[in-house]
Image (spheres, coloured by chain):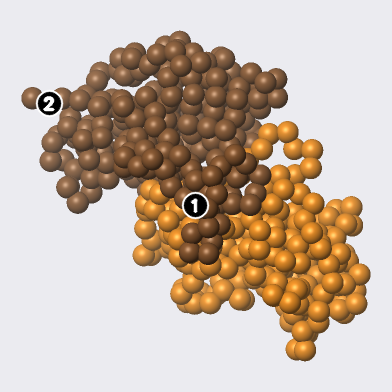
Amino acid sequence: MVDKTLATVKEAVAPVFDGAVILLGGFGDPGLPGQLLEALRLQGAKNLTVVHNGSGGGVHSLGGLIHDGKVKKLIASFPSNPGNQSFQEKYLKGEVELELVPQGTLAERIRAAGAGLGGFFTPTGAGTDLAAGKEARVIDGREMIFEKALHADFAFVRAHKGDRLGNLTYRMAMRNFNVPMCTAAKHVVAEIDELVPVGGIDPEDVHTPGIFVDHIVEIVRHPEYLKITTEGR
Amino acid sequence: MSLTRDGIAYRVACDLPEGSYVNLGIGIPTLVSGYIPAGKDVFFHSENGILGMGGLAAPGKEDPDLINAGKQYVTLNPGASFFDHPTSFSMIRGGHINYAVLGALEVAANGDMANWRTPGEKVPGVGGAMDLAFGAENVLVTMTHVTNKGKPKILNKCTLPLTAPHCVKRIYTDMAVVDVTPEGLLLREFAPGLDPQAVQARTDAQLRVAPDCREMNLPAKFHVAQPAA
């Protein structure tokens, strides 16, 4: 019998190795796997490359991982939120490298990796500072730049419900980067609000089919959940 | 006289047609949704996967899974939908979003726009600004006409790094409504109490005055004696 559930976030992050590339889901709090992130910080792997829309808030989020010096490089679209002190301090000291990617390009680079594509041409960024070093081509009269697929070793996301086969469904704005991230990493773990029996998610409502998911961990939300992760990111 | 920040937003809202799909940036643009009259269907999009977004959530009524791209708790209008980031940016980059209303630091006479890097800024961030500026069917800019030091923001050429070249269709400021046309900038409206010469005096680039150029007709609550800071 297939059973992708794990009992703890500690087991879920155990395989992460030094130098790993990690897709970290969520946009703001919705979809952010706060407990997996905290387990990762305690696990100790270092020289990580983290892919996330922002740069994390305080010490109980991506900011904590950065504060502890575990992150070598951040690939993000909006790392400049004034609340994200940990990243900004390390970045200004030259201790964290930044690859700045427009938000839609970041999502599509991840999607392309999951879909088996090498990359794509996009108009976004053509003729700007972010086009530096990228192949340019005029397609149907419009200047475009080449953006490469973004593969990863691990993806960590949060979903609303999951079953032991790894099928996931999200709630409201939780879907964001999580849907493409689940397709683009070798090893995918979802932290979920509620574990349901197989068949407990209507097939019409499965947003991430279980084929993309290796493990799920149920982390029931409690009133403190928001307090833990509600900081600028 | 000039317009308040809400006055600029109100003036933009007047131009958004029924049935349009609209993305609002941070700052003055977020105020636009408050001025769509009841019964006029305008659909607001948020980069993080929402179409049909309503106003801000009332205190105590916030849902932790329902935020806008500015990380504020929001509500939904009937007929709303949720989707993932690739779908959300297909709406933007694919030209399905009819109007992106964005704040800007500088706009040039040819429609070049700069809004993602400020002078002296140490940590860069671009978010969805470039995707919107390149992808939306119409890019509308809202901003104060001059900086807080009185320097014009509508220029012959942008001095800051561009968000996108040739992207702006119309500029709404506290002093004027200006169209970007193939022949250059066209002054369409000026704030109550001003005239085209007063607007030109605060504009670096040359303005042509539209034959039907007129004083804006806005409720008095949107007027202020001094330009909006």
Figure check: A215 above or below B33: above
> At numbered mark 1, what does the secondary structure look like: helix, strand or loop?
strand
- Tell me what residue is drawn at x 53 percent, y 32 percent: A75
Asked whether, in this view, residue A179 is left or right of residue B162, the answer is left
Rendered shade, chain A: brown
Label 2's element?
loop
Residue B175 shows in this picture: yes
Q: CA distance from mark 2 to mark 1?
A: 40 Å
* Farthest residue, direction left: A1
Within 10 angstroms of label 2, few (less than 14), some, or many (20 or more) residues?
A: few
Q: Please tell me whether residue B73 is drawn above or below residue B196 in the rendered image.
A: above
- Expressed as whole percent of the image width and height from the top left, the position of residue B59 reads 53, 48
Residue B33, by quadrant, is bottom right
Q: Residue at x 79, y 51 (%)?
A: B159
The colour with which the image depicts chain B is: orange
Q: Is residue A166 left or right of residue A123?
A: left
Q: Which residue is mark 2?
A: A2
